[in-house]
Amino acid sequence: MQSLSLAVTLLVLVLAVVVTGQQQKYTDKFDNINVDQVLGNDRILSNYLKCLLDKGPCTQEGRELKRLLPDALKTSCEKCSEKQRTSSRKVINHLETKKPAEWKKLLDKYDPEGIYKSKVEKLGRGA
């Protein structure tokens, strides 16, 4: 159960899509998550990727993530704290190197015209 909670939190944090009220920044509610631990759990990460790709069931958090993901891509994490940017870089790098097919599917689904791809990949490289 703790791993499931970590995965949900990671996805919300990494994609920086949970906004509270009229804040200019995304919430820091998930900043203390061990991103490496979550990325190391392939089963949980896979379940959330399936949710995002409409290939499996979603938790309430997964549905929220799917709803807000386009905004996170569009803003290139502009509303992220430095901690969130660091975590985002880890996740992007992990997906690009360890799960390139899933990374491509996410980009194809949420950025079909390739408008935000270079910005997101620059974020992954730390640029």
Image (cartoon, grey):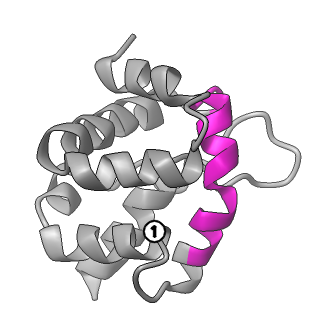
- The spot of residue 36 in percent (x, y) is 17, 50
- Where residue 99 sits: x, y (%)? 19, 51
Left or right side of 36 for 75: right
Who's the residue at 33% across and 31% down the image?
89
Does the magenta segment cover residue 116?
Answer: no
In the image, farthest residue toward the front = 113
Residue 68 covered by magenta stretch: yes
Query: Where is mark 1, residue-wise?
Result: 53
Q: Nearer the viewer, residue 69 or 7?
A: 69
> In the figure, 112 relative to 63: above or below?
above
For the question of whether residue 34 can be seen, the reply is no
In the drawing, does residue 45 fall left or right of residue 32? left
Q: Is residue 5 visible?
A: yes
Q: Position of residue 13 (x, y in %)?
A: 47, 51
Q: How many marks?
A: 1
Q: Main secondary structure of the magenta part?
A: helix
Image quarter where the C terminus lies is: top left
Residue type (three-letter) at the residue carrying disc 1: Leu
Figure quadrant of the N terminus = bottom left
Query: In percent of the image, x 60 and y 76: which residue is there?
Result: 63
Query: Which residue is drawn at the image coordinates 68% and 65% (left, top)?
Result: 67
Q: Position of residue 5 (x, y in %)?
A: 36, 77
Q: From which residue to which does the magenta span run?
A: 63-79
Q: Quadrant of residue 84?
A: top left
State whether residue 55 is above or below residue 92.
below
Residue 45, picture quadrant: bottom left
Residue at x 38% of width, y 58% of height: 10
Q: SS at mark 1?
A: loop
